[in-house]
Image (cartoon, rainbow, N blue to C red):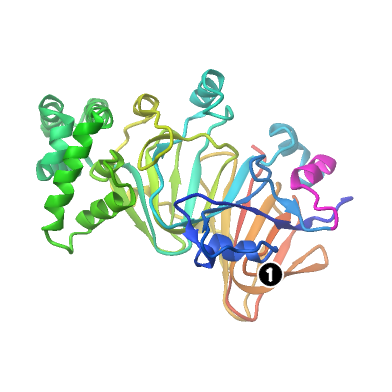
């Protein structure tokens, strides 16, 4: 290899309104390690690690070399197969997110839809790629993911008259009749669920505002220990003025995760992050179709038509990791672009990662230690980020607790 296999990176932050402020944000704390000055009043929402043109990582060297330029010069860092397959780019975008308030109700298109949206609306949808993604909690984490079991939705329609009012009596009755039938006709159930979601999302704004006012006034006088009521009131405080996304809480799974728990968000599945810090990885795209909890453009018609309308429990949304070594876990979603390994070491422990036939990016999320690759040693400190080239063995050791995440891709 004509280029060293390990390169320390400086990643760029993204400031969005929903991000945590100043050094309360893990994004900001990690970015400080590579020299970024932190403004305590500024929201630091995302740290982008990779070659995406909106915020490309650079090598910490005298020339401030863009990572993508280095991969173009030395394709062996990526492997020729992956280099050719993804046109000399990294196929994934690795992120840290620090969430102060809920993100938009959204879904990401599959490749077919992504290509069509990019062709028809290039000013809104910036590339033709799909955007499956995976989130692993760093701290206690809340999210919406997928549609609730139909019985839960039925109970919410009956329990929350404001929801039933927006959906309308005909759609409500059809849904209740459909799911009460003894035969489990999944496609028929999905059609009924789609009718409910479509009716809700297309509700006139003045009716939405009126029903949210009724809902929140009623809930403020109810049991304060009801977690769903607390969530609805919290979302109304974050997005005042009648945001339809508040009612999505009654249709979508409310998922809570502890550190190390993960969920995979496939194409055409509704979701939204609510609070906490996470590691996130996705295909290298920025396509988002939104429909609530946002002041940004809402493409309700596209969202309603694109969703799969799969339904199931909140727990069913979570992933089960596999072993990746003595002290590592592998989160391997059902896509080609990326997987993530989590390594957790206690004082005096060591871990080896066998050679991976593809490029990877590693970030230390807590603690410190040392890494050895091809006879060279590298410091592992909280917030340090490294690009690791293909086909090298990696060894880590620590005299304190140490945690790092490594996103990678392999040839298909």
Tell me where residue 332 appears, x and y as whole percent. Answer: 53, 49
Residue at which label 1 appears: 380
Q: Is residue 131 above or below residue 137?
A: above
* Residue 63 is inside the magenta segment: yes
At horizontal 56% and vertical 60% (from top left) the residue drawn is 27
Nearest the viewer among 224 and 3 is 224
Residue 334 visible to the viewer = yes
In this picture, residue 52 sits left or right of residue 62: left
Q: Position of residue 211 (x, y in %)?
A: 17, 39
| Residue segment shown in magenta | 62-75
Q: Position of residue 188 (x, y in %)?
A: 23, 25
Asked if residue 278 lies left or right of residue 411, the reply is: left
- Residue 100, compared with residue 79, is above or below; it is below
Looking at this view, is 128 or 123 the one in front?
Answer: 123
- Name the outermost residue toward the right: 2
Task: Locate residue 242: give its quadrant.
Answer: top left
Residue 162, located in which quarter of the rendered image? Answer: top left
Magenta-colored stretch includes residue 297: no
Secondary structure of the residue carrying tag 1 is strand
Q: Residue at 64% x, 65% y: name it.
A: 32
* Nearer to the camera, 76 or 257: 257
Q: Residue at x 75, y 43 (%)?
A: 68
Q: Residue 382 placed where, x, y %?
A: 62, 69
Depth order, front residue of 411/266: 266
The quarter in which the C terminus is drawn is top right
**Badge 1: how crowded within 10 Å, few (<14), some, or many (20+)?**
many
């Amino acid at each position: 290899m004509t280029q060293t296999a390990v390169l320390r990176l400086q990643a760029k932050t993204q400031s969005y309104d929903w991000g945590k402020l100043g050094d309360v944000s893990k994004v900001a704390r990690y970015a400080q390690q590579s020299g970024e000055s932190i403004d305590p009043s500024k929201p630091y929402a995302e740290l982008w690690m990779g070659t995406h043109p909106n915020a490309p990582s650079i090598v910490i060297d005298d020339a401030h070399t863009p990572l993508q330029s280095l991969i173009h010069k030395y394709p062996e860092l990526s492997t020729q197969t992956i280099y050719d397959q993804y046109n000399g780019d990294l196929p994934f975008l690795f992120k840290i997110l620090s969430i102060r308030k809920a993100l938009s109700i959204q879904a990401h298109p599959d490749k077919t839809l992504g290509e069509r949206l990019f062709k028809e609306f290039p000013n809104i949808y910036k590339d033709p790629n799909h955007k499956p993604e995976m989130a692993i909690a760093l701290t206690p984490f809340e999210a919406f993911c997928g549609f609730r079991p139909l019985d839960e939705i039925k109970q919410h329609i009956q329990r929350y008259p404001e929801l039933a009012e927006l959906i309308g009596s005909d759609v409500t009755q059809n849904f209740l009749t459909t799911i009460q039938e003894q035969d489990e006709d999944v496609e028929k159930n999905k059609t009924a669920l789609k009718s409910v979601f479509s009716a809700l999302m297309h509700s006139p704004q003045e009716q939405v505002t009126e029903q949210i006012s009724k809902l929140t006034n009623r809930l403020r006088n109810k049991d304060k220990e009801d977690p769903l009521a607390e969530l609805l009131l919290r979302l109304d405080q974050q997005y005042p003025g009648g945001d339809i996304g508040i009612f999505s809480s009654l249709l979508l799974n409310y998922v809570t995760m502890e550190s190390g728990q993960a969920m995979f968000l496939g194409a055409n599945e509704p979701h939204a992050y609510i609070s906490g810090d996470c590691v996130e990885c996705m295909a290298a795209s920025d396509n988002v179709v939104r429909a609530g909890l946002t002041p940004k453009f809402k493409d309700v018609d596209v969202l309603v038509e694109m969703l799969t309308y799969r339904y199931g429990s909140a727990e069913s949304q979570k992933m089960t990791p596999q072993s990746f070594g003595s002290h590592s876990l592998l989160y391997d979603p059902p896509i080609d672009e990326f997987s993530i390994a989590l390594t957790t070491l206690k004082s005096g422990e060591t871990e080896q990662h066998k050679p991976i036939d593809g490029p990877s990016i590693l970030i230390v999320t807590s603690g410190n230690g040392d890494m050895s690759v091809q006879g060279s040693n590298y410091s592992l400190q909280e917030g340090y980020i490294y690009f690791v080239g293909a086909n090298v063995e990696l060894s880590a050791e620590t005299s304190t607790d140490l945690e790092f995440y490594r996103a990678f891709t392999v040839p298909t």
